[in-house]
Structures are given as C-alpha cells and as structure tokens.
Amino acid sequence: MLYNTENPHGGDIYEGKIELDFSANTNPFGVPEGVKAAVSACLDRLSAYPDPYCRRLVSAIAEHENVPKEYVLCGAGAAELIYSFASAVRPGRAAELAPTFAEYSLPLADADINRFYLKEENGFRPTRDFIDFVDEAKPEAVFLCNPNNPTGVSADPGLIEEAARKCRDAGCRLFLDECFMDLADEPASFVPRLAEYPNAAVIKAFTKAHGMAGLRLGYCLSADAELLTRMSRAVQPWNVSSAAQEAGIAALSETAFIEKTRLFIKKERPRMAAELKKLGFAVFDSEVNFLLIKGSPGLDEGLLKMGIKIRNCANYHGLGEGCYRVAVKLPEENDRLAEAVSEVLKWQGT
C-alpha cells in the first residue's frame, strides 16, 4: 500500500463487502435530487477546465451566509481547507480539544500541540476551563470543532465568543470547524460574528448535511482577506471541479431538505440511543447525526463480519478501546445495527 494509512477515517467501504456503513456521518437521506440534477446537467461541459475562482459558487455562498464575497474561499472538501490553513498560518504552538477530529494536528508536524482533554463525566462538553487552558498554553492557533467530532456536542455560544475574544487579544488564530452545524438540533454558527473577529476562520462543507462526500467541496469564511489569499496559494489550480461547483450552488437552495433531515435526526437519534443502551452500552448525549458509544472491545470487528462498518475511536486522543462512533441512519438501518450488535455480543459471551 503506497498511501498513508496511519490515520484511518470513517467511510472506507472499498475493501470487503460492506452493506451498511455507520462509520461515515453523512445525511441519512443521501444526496438531494436537485444536486443530482445539477451534476447531471454539467456532464457535457466536463471537457472545459472548471472556474479556478469558483465565481458563481462564491457568490451563492456569500448570499447564503450573508457575508461579503471577499470572505469566501472554496476548497476540495474541509480537509483541503484544514491543510491550507495550516500551511498559511504555520503556528509554532497550537491548541485543540481531545477527543476531536484528528486532521487538525496532522499538518502541524513541527508544532507544539497542546490538548484540552474533555471529561467523560461532563459528557465531553467544553467548559470554562478551556479559556484558562488557552490563556496558559499561549498558542498561535486554536482549533475548535463545533459541534465536535466524535462527541456530537456543541460548545456554548458564549464560550466560543470568549475563546474568539481571548485569541484576538492575544494575536492568535481561531479555526472553527462547523461542518456538522447544519445538522445540529439548535444551530448556532459563529459566521455572523466574523466581522468583529478577523482572527477567526470558519470552515463548512457539503459533505455531511448534503451527503456529498464523493464530490469533495467545502468553504472557508473569514474577514481576513490576506489569510484567505495565503490559503489559496497553498492548493493546486482548479482544485474544485465543475461538478462540485454546480452541486454546491444547487445544494445551497436545499433548505427544506436540510430542515427535514434535522427534524428526523432529532427524533430518530434518541430512539437509536435507547436501543444501544438496552444492549449495555454507555451512549453519550449528542446534538447531531451520530452517537459516541462505549462498551465491548472488538465490536467493530464482529460487525465487519456481518457487512456492517462502524468507526472505532481508539485512535482519538482522550478515548480508548471500546469507544465507537455510529451514524444515525434510517430507522430500518438503525434497527438492523441494533440486531447485529446483539448478535456480536452473544458471540463474545457478553
């Protein structure tokens, strides 16, 4: 294998026979029909290079987010934007939560990474102690995933603003990952505050809420035009395909689809959690389309034999063996997962 496999993610369904994938937290309803139609309509134009500046998409995002076009930078998924941010800022010291999405620290190979360990007894919810931690660590960049992955928990909006203020006053960059915000029970984006905090950058993606993981499309919002320019220089030309640009424009109009998804998840998630609790798992509160659970080690391997994939979270800082993340899918799929988990526990004798 020539590729880097040291930091596995969910969604790798390309080896073995995977019938149900609970490891990727994408929309349970899949891709909106309007997005599929937009991609299909652009097929005859694939012989032309894509717009290198994503002009129509940038305008659509700016209108959707109610920000100036100068605040918007598009990228080939959130991951590319994380790496281009790291390349543009190059912090010597950085801070992040633990557990959280693993990609923030990976492009910071030469940086001193300080981690604020969230407490299981608090449901992995960030507390006011995080502000004191940032004050003591004196990082040059702070990475916050909100709602957090893999916990599914949002930080209090007041805490986020206090962190932004602390970072701004200290000359520190604040990187806010809001890729799951559109699917949160009570969305509270930081985007309306960007003009007050030019030290902050918010990333969003079409991967989760719109089910567009295969198209690779995200965007970064910041009032710091110089930062966005440096980020744009860190990626290859034509990094966002024509199909992705057309899909993104169409996706922004799918507000009813997103609202339908949000209401479904809010109803289905507690039912799914209750079934897993009956099977003996600790299930932590979540506000989005996935659950962090803790229980029997080896569950993922047992389920894989049944064609079901879940996310083993043992490689997250602050978690360990027996911790898993499972996506909220359609009711019949969630029921099948519960039945399969029950079967695996019987095999294990637990």
Image (cartoon, rainbow, N blue to C red):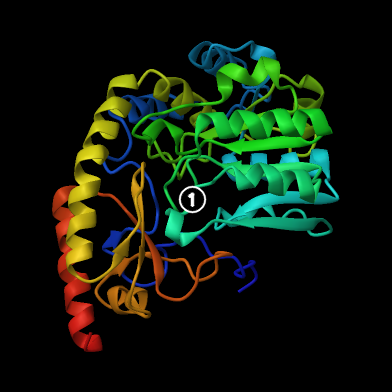
**Looking at the rendering, in which quadrant would you find the C terminus?**
bottom left
Quadrant of the rendered image containing residue 115:
bottom right
Q: Is residue 327 left or right of residue 54?
A: left
Q: What type is the residue that disc 1 sits on?
A: Asn
Q: Is 235 drawn above or below residue 307 in the view shown?
A: above
The one nearer the camera, 299 or 54, is 299
Image-quadrant location for residue 337 = bottom left
Residue under the image location 86 percent in, 50 percent down? 92
Of residue 350 and residue 216, the one placed in the foreground of this image is 350
Q: Residue at x 52, y 39 (%)?
A: 146
Figure quadrant of the N terminus: bottom right
Report the residue at 24% width, 28% height from top.
260
Q: What residue is shown with label 1?
A: 149
| Residue 181: x %, y % from top left | 45, 34
Q: Nearer the viewer, residue 24 or 285?
A: 285
* Looking at the image, residue 221 lies above or below residue 289: above
